[in-house]
Image: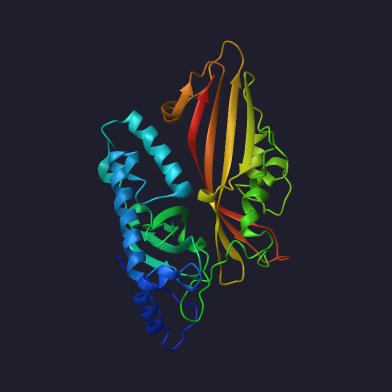
Amino acid sequence: MRVRARAAKAVAGAAGALAMAASLSGCITVHGETAVVPAASQSGAERAVQRYLDTMNEVSVSFDAEQVGPTMTGPLAEITEASLTALHGINPDGNPDPEAATVEFTRTEVFIPEQAGWPKFFVAEVTLSDDDGGAHWLLVFTRNSIDERWKAAYRAILPPDEVPELEVDDNGYLVDIPLDDGAAGLAVPPAELSTAYAGTLDGDGALNGDGYLQSGEGPFASGPYTDQLLAERETEPAPEEDWQYRDWAANEPEHAPVAMRTADGSALVFFTSHHSDRQTVAPGHTPSVSEEVEQLMEGEARTSVTRTWLSMQLALVPAEGEGDVEILRRHPGIIEARGE
């Protein structure tokens, strides 16, 4: 596996400066609470990507959710753990097709910002082998202190021609957008993106109607994860069924968004949101429950089943006045289910 930093501009001596910064970062980041320093060393980032790949391949075969914690965190960990729990319940002996379960990274680029304070992050863009479809993965790794290991918190899978070009400075460092940087000149501030997309709930758990998925209004471009998603929800269900949907922002610390500049002046933002759907059926009918949902379900689905989802989104946020937010990818995963 090859890991390197990519520079947007050719600057004499940048490679040497980056190498020196990487070699010093192991001691400098001890004081990273106030100093602006590289978020990670090149070698540390490389080791984190390799650990993630090794763990992902192991759990794809074993379906052992307990292996997730040491290498993943945040929404990626929660979605992965729930998925593995369900798969292990169906196949206690592990993946029946282990050879097809693993992937290989044929190329990896690491983008490291300079940051002060905690948490810190870096981004890895990896290319899968042709046998695995040749797709590109964008992975965000975070940690909250110098004593923690880097863990993968977000993942987005994109075709090669849809991967945005990230902005780096003259020294080869990724240009990040701190969440306390106000609007940062963007159509939607990264810290407010989850609320703008999914809305909020009031104190009684009722929808406030203040997000795009709740109201159908907001600065979001047409696409499969916006107006087309809402249109799918309006599709007439079977006569014996009724469906209800709820969406709300994920503003918990473990679901914090991560934002960075793209070469065209926009921002690439990873963010999380909560969702649920409830299927209720008429007397004499039974709710439809998949094998995976059944493994995660509490109670018995006699008349209804409620599925709770956590979703990771990758959004391209333009500069203020330059258009609407485009949701590039949405990766939802069921984390809980309840039958009644």
Residue at point 69%, 33% (across, down): 206
Q: Where is residue 196? Give x, y as percent.
A: 67, 50
Residue at point 63%, 39% (across, down): 247
Q: Where is residue 51? Give x, y as percent.
A: 31, 56
In the rendered structure, the answer to whether residue 339 lies left or right of residue 5 reads: right
Residue 90, by quadrant, is: top left
Classify 243 as above or below 274: above
Q: Where is residue 259? Give x, y as percent.
A: 56, 62
Residue 320, by quadrant, is: bottom right
Residue at point 69%, 45% (across, down): 211
35 or 194: nearer the eye?
Answer: 35
Residue 139, by quadrant, is: bottom left
Quarter occupied by the N terminus:
bottom left
Q: Which colour scheme is used?
A: rainbow
Q: Where is residue 312? Give x, y as percent.
A: 52, 48
53 or 113: nearer the eye?
Answer: 113
Q: How many marks?
A: 0
In the rendered structure, the answer to whether residue 120 lies left or right of residue 68 reads: right
Residue furthest to the top in view is: 284
Residue furthest to the bottom in view is: 12
Quarter occupied by the C terminus:
top right
